[in-house]
Amino acid sequence: MDLTAETFGPEMGVALANFDRHVVCLEKVPDDCETSLRSLMEKALKAYQNRGPELRHGIALDRHLTIILSQTDGPRPLCGIYFNLHSPWSKKAVQPEPSKA
């Protein structure tokens, strides 16, 4: 089976609909999300097709999206599209200074 980004068009369509309806992202508008989704799908496909014999997944991600293609017994891999939780306002944990004793 020849795998392309269009092979996973239904999954990407559902992800884009969910992004548009449920995800608040200050850095990525829905059009940018679609572009990123297509680019990441192509990267995940490349990783999946070039994986080693002992590996079962192809993964591609950025700060906002993760795509995982997983090998199955059938000709088409399973496709998981995840929205990464991220807050631009989160602060890094403050490390306590060592005591000077």
Image: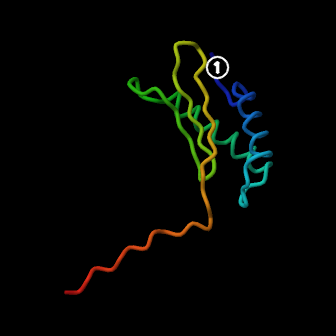
Image location (x, y in percent) of residue 82: 62, 40
Which residue occupies 52% across, 13% down? 73
The amino acid type of the residue labelled 1 equals: Asp
Which residue occupies 61% across, 29% down? 79
Crowd around label 1: few <14 · some 14–19 · many ≥20 (10 Å):
few
Image location (x, y in percent) of residue 17: 79, 39
The residue that label 1 is drawn on is 2
Q: Is residue 49 above or below residue 43?
A: above
Identity of the residue furthest to the top in this view: 74
At numbered mark 1, what does the secondary structure look like: helix, strand or loop? loop
Q: Is residue 13 left or right of residue 76?
A: right
Which residue occupies 57% across, 12% down? 74
Q: Is residue 71 left or right of residue 99?
A: right
Identity of the residue furthest to the left in this view: 101
Q: Is residue 54 left or right of residue 76?
A: left
Image location (x, y in percent) of residue 52: 41, 28
Image location (x, y in percent) of residue 43: 59, 38
Which residue occupies 72% across, 34% down? 12
Image quarter hosting the N terminus: top right
